[in-house]
Image: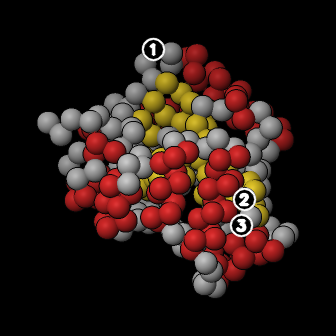
Amino acid sequence: MNQHRIFADYHTHTEYSHGKGTPAAVVEAALNRGLKAVAISEHAAGHMIYGVRGRELDRLHGEIARLRIEHAGRIDVLRGAELNVTGFGTCDCPENRDEYDVIIIGYHKGIAPVNRFAAHIWGESMFKVMGDPRRNAESLLVAAESCRANIISHPNLYIRVDIPYLAECARQLGIALEINSSHVSLTADEIKLIARKGCKLVIGSDAHTPERVGDFEKAACMADKCHVWDSIINAVSSEG
């Protein structure tokens, strides 16, 4: 098992959205796992149910700022956000994008069907209505570029996307595709293809409890199987 290779967990949730546990508990869990960095990456405001907004968002950012100071020199505590695609090429990017260390973006259930493409997201994610994987990828990439995303979360989990096209364009944009350890949404062949195209990968726990922070077992097994460790941005490059 190669869990020890991974030094950061950029995809975690807390009680502020649909997780359990406080940001402090997430950071403590990351320290106990020996991680060098952890991001609190709650859903942005566009998610009808889990989006963090208003005073709650301000309170969350205040906690992250305090934890960053408290644990300086021990672990990097990062301000993250998991954005939601809300229409064709649109997302709920925060106005103050530069204040975030890590921006993740992906398709999710729970987006209000307020426009034609959002209704399509609703139909495909909730009711498995078949869409166009290439168009889905195009929409995701336009949104990711507009918000200068760092990571595309769990490709293919809720909506099918054209993985070869997504990988080629994400490589050009410098965006990593996630091997999600809670929902391994990519096949081994897709992971190998992504790496062959020169697109970077990232392993995220998508933890919804402190106990799962830094739990990369399922994703690490896929990385082993596919021999793609050199493509993973939050892992040491050596196989040794």
For label 1, the crowd category at 10 Å Cα-Cα, with few meaning under 14, some 14 to 19 and many 20 or more, is few
Residue 55 horizontal/vertical position (percent): 83, 38
Element under disc 1: loop
For label 3, the crowd category at 10 Å Cα-Cα, with few meaning under 14, some 14 to 19 and many 20 or more, is some
**Mark before the other along the chain sequence, 1 or 2:** 1
Pick whichever, 207 or 44, lies toward us.
44
Q: Residue furthest left?
A: 240
Q: Is residue 9 visible?
A: yes
Seen at 34% across and 45% down, the residue is 231
Which label sits in the foreground, 3 or 2? 2
Residue 17 horizontal/vertical position (percent): 67, 51
**Mark before the other along the chain sequence, 3 or 1:** 1
> Is residue 24 toward the left or the right of residue 55 in the image?
left
Q: Which residue is mark 1?
A: 73
Distance of mark 3 from mark 1, alpha carbons?
A: 38 Å
Q: Which residue is mark 3?
A: 110
Pick whichever, 117 or 13, lies toward us.
117
Q: Which residue is mark 2?
A: 89
Distance of mark 1 from mark 2, alpha carbons?
A: 39 Å
Residue 66 horizontal/vertical position (percent): 63, 21
Q: Amino acid at mark 3?
A: Gly
| In the rendered image, the vertical position of residue 202 relative to residue 193, given as above or below | above
Which quadrant of the figure contains the C terminus? Answer: top left
